[in-house]
């Protein structure tokens, strides 16, 4: 039996863990309009232009909104992107463009935006800017960096206007600005804080039980974030079910049984987002599609099974946390589809939590089932056909949870599985590193279609 001091010490440690998880949750779950990689390109491009124009305030927002006369003074805009960021943004729909796509348009359109909006930067542009932005795309150059050891995300933009120039860099996270400078001097210099780097190690030391215990009593601020995530993803899904968007995968699958409904609900949200819907998603661990995957299969199931709102919120919160946990064991971007790995694991855990009403054993078995099943799908960029993948993944999520409920899971001797879910997630992270050479082949194939030349 624990003595009083040991009980108090255990309680203090529990509070510290809960506080830390809340901190990470708020950092990794946030609204994003359009593809997060396109938004990163938008942020860094807007910063570069506005640095050249001397139009940035101390918070990296614009002092005044740019009009055509300022933006059209630009002589050229040079982008340097990491391979994964390039492939994810190359053919994705840009918000407020009626389905138009591409990196150059994202960069040009963002010149009218406010970088302080972060991943919501396209919310600050207007349709009236689209024609001029289309004309400016010919001034945008793209270079792909071959290697960026230590960083998951890299985007650099340099804008030139006569003798004036501005330059900005984002590293590691989609909205982590590390440098803004201009012909007038350095405006902002940052980095990756010790707190951010420390998050990765601390999260990886937690267990699935820690995350499951956390969602039993959620802080009010986390409940609000999850409720907002459900609201945003549902709105995208509703939009994709109302009319065919992108490939119209969800729209085509919407009539059928529970499995078909989960596929349709999930794919339709992706259809809308990849088309360039003006409605944001909730990004989880840097990805709006991961937000869709870690939300909609659980919501769709609850919607058809006498929804318990409190249980739904706790289930989706667990899904988000396990997605973040899996991301920290791997990376933000990779040659592997994050929805078919990280978010699929999270959503399997969340759906299992919902259908079992919080049974930890079912949650862990669902994770093992999913890891044994579907991971291995490549990521060949953000695009309309991501909806096909999300339909397939949502089916595997549902299957993993149902099998877990019936006490089914593979032997730990199978494939990359370990004796526990944490070990299996760690092993999957090792696979992320091993498939790095595939990234070059994927990017080269995509670049042939979207660039005149490919610079390493």
Image (cartoon, helix red, strand yellow):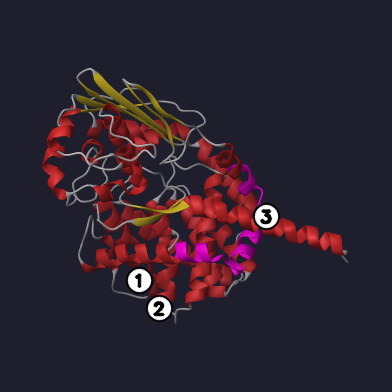
Camera-nearest label, 2 or 3: 3
Other-residue count near label 1 (Cα within 10 Å), few / some / many at <14 / 14–19 / ≥20? many
Q: In this image, 224 relative to 137: left or right?
A: right
Q: Are marks 1 and 2 in contact (CB under 8 Å)?
A: yes
253 or 313: which is nearer to us? Answer: 313
Q: Is residue 420 visible?
A: no
Q: Can residue 32 be seen in this view?
A: yes
Tell me: residue 352, above or below residue 386: below
Give the quarter of the figure containing the C terminus.
top left
Q: Where is residue 391 in the image (x, y as percent from the top left)?
A: 36, 60
Q: Position of residue 232 (x, y in %)?
A: 35, 62
Label 1 element class? helix
For this orientation, the residue located farthest to the top is 163
440 or 125: which is nearer to us? Answer: 125
Q: In this image, 417 relative to 450: left or right?
A: right
- The numbered mark, 2 or 3, whose residue comes first in the sequence reads 3
Q: In this image, 262 relative to 410: left or right?
A: left
For residue 304, which numbered disc appears in the image?
2
- The numbered mark, 1 or 2, whose residue comes first in the sequence reads 1
Label 3 element class? helix
The reply to whether the magenta stretch includes residue 222 is: yes
Residue highlighted by disc 1? 261
Residue highlighted by disc 3? 16
Q: How far apart are marks 2 and 3 (CA)?
A: 38 Å
The reply to whether the magenta stretch includes residue 305 is: no
Image quadrant where residue 3 sits: bottom right
Q: Give the range drawn in magenta.
A: 200-226
Give the quarter of the figure containing the N terminus.
bottom right
Tell me: residue 88, above or below residue 161: below
Other-residue count near label 3 (Cα within 10 Å), few / some / many at <14 / 14–19 / ≥20? few
């Amino acid at each position: 039996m624990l003595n009083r001091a040991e009980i108090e010490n255990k309680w203090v440690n529990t509070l510290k863990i809960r506080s830390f998880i809340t901190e990470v949750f708020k950092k990794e779950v946030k609204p994003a309009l359009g593809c997060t990689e396109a938004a990163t390109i938008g942020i860094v491009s807007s910063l570069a232009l506005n640095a050249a124009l001397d139009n940035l305030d101390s918070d990296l927002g614009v002092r005044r909104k740019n009009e055509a006369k300022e933006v059209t003074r630009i002589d050229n805009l040079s982008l340097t992107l990491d391979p994964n960021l390039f492939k994810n943004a190359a053919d994705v729909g840009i918000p407020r463009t009626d389905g138009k796509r591409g990196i150059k348009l994202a960069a040009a359109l963002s010149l009218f935006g406010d970088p302080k909006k972060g991943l919501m930067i396209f919310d600050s542009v207007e349709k009236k800017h689209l024609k001029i932005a289309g004309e400016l795309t010919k001034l945008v150059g793209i270079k792909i960096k071959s290697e960026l050891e230590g960083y998951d995300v890299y985007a650099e933009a340099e804008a030139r206007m006569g003798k004036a120039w501005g330059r900005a860099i984002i590293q590691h996270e989609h909205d982590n600005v590390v440098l803004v400078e201009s012909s007038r001097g350095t405006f902002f210099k940052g980095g990756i804080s010790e707190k951010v780097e420390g998050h990765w190690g601390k999260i990886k030391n937690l267990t699935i039980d820690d995350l499951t215990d956390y969602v039993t009593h959620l802080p009010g601020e986390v409940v609000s974030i999850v409720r907002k995530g459900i609201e945003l993803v549902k709105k995208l899904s509703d939009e994709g079910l109302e009319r065919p968007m992108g490939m119209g995968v969800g729209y085509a699958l919407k009539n059928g049984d529970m499995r078909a409904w989960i596929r349709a609900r999930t794919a339709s949200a992706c259809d809308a987002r990849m088309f360039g819907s003006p409605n944001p998603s909730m990004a989880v661990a840097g990805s709006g599609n991961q937000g869709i995957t870690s939300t909609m299969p659980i919501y769709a199931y609850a919607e058809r099974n006498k929804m318990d709102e409190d249980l739904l919120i706790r289930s989706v919160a667990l899904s988000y946390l396990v997605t973040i946990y899996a991301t920290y064991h791997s990376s933000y971007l990779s040659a592997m589809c994050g929805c078919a790995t990280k978010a699929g694991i999270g959503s399997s855990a969340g759906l299992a939590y919902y259908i079992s009403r919080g049974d930890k054993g079912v949650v862990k078995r669902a994770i093992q089932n999913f890891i044994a099943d579907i991971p291995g799908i490549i990521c060949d960029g953000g695009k309309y056909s991501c909806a096909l993948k999300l339909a397939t993944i949502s089916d595997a999520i549902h299957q993993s949870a149902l099998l877990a409920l019936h006490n089914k899971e593979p032997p730990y001797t199978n494939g990359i599985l370990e004796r526990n879910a944490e070990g299996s997630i760690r092993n999957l992270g090792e696979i992320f590193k091993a498939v790095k050479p595939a990234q070059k082949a994927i990017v080269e194939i995509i670049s042939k279609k979207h660039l005149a030349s490919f610079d390493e």
